Image: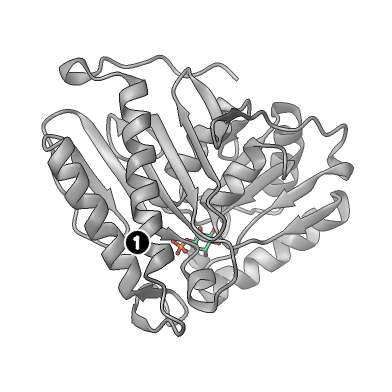
Amino acid sequence: MISPALPELPDGVTVTDLRDLAVRLATAAGVLVREGRPDRVVVAATKSSDVDPVTVMDRASEDLLREMIAAERPDDAILGEEGDDVAGTSGLTWVLDPIDGTVNYLYGVASWAVSVAVVAGPPEPASWTVLAGCVHSVADGRTWSAGLGEGATRDGVPVRVGTPTSLGSCLVGTGFGYDAARRAHQAQVLTQVLPKIRDIRRLGSAAIDLCLLADGSLDLYYERGLNPWDMAAGAVVASEAGAVVTGLRGGPATHAMTVAGPAELVAQLAEILEAADADGASSPEIG
Ligand code: LIP
């Protein structure tokens, strides 16, 4: 996978500097989330549906991330899952998911992460350049990070995508939405995918899924409905580990669909997903 061209960076900062800061941010918020998790987590609010929770810790984690960014890079913009957008003047935007895998955090299912990325250009997946990112798995401390053109690591050790020999041998990560109609459609798509692969894993955190792809613990990943903060850091870790991260029909990865993995197998999976209308291009009413 050839890394995108490096855009001009502001104030002499380097990709390495940004990657180091992303790691410090994600691990600091990870300590807060890990040490502050009560025995019984309560839902503070819901968002897109009554099964799309926000916890007090989602908000506390993002508050800490925002405070640290304001202190270290006050001219950068911020796009976070839980708080208001913050405009910037540097051309860089920090994309924050304070707890990716909130439902897992709520139930105590050990797959939730703090995901921090920094992008250049418009803060939207179809047109941004992700410069650096970190995904810190809170339950077990694993920390993936990547910088544009620098490769990807897990706990400092370089990682590369796996080398599955065929689609039928692939272990594929995916996820499902918070809306019942969306889930019904995703279940239909799954009936077209599952017979053609080894098996599915639905682990509940897109950020961790993309990092597991990066280190060969998953062979492929696809999901419809990811928000920018779900995918930003995991996408740069995966792409710097050799994955193609894309959408369907030759488009970029966006909310409509994210498919990631080795190029040839991504093409085979994308063909199945397109035939199943997995991005809803032919069924916009589902949303
Ligand atoms: C989650 C994603 C996951 C998806 C869930 C949810 P959140 O993000 O990481 O892949 O399947 O529906 O969107 O809401 O926990 O930050």
Residue drawn at 14 percent across, 44 percent down: 70
The residue furthest front is 35
- Whether residue 248 is visible: yes
Judge by depth and name the residue closer to the eye, 102 or 91: 102
- Whether residue 252 is visible: no
**Label 1 element class:** helix
Image quadrant assignment for residue 92: top left
Give how far across and how far down residue 56 sits, in percent.
Answer: 31, 74
Residue drawn at 87 percent across, 56 percent down: 195
Amino acid type for the residue under numbered disc 1: Leu
Q: Quadrant of the N terminus?
A: top right
Image quadrant assignment for residue 69: top left
Instruction: Tell me if 162 is positioned left or right of 29 in this view.
Output: right
**Vertical side of 81 occupied by 18: above or below:** above
Instruction: Tell me if 15 is positioned left or right of 282 in this view.
Output: left
Give how far across and how far down residue 122 sits, in percent.
Answer: 27, 34
Q: Which residue is mark 1?
A: 32
Residue drawn at 35 percent across, 21 percent down: 15
Judge by depth and name the residue closer to the eye, 34 or 90: 34
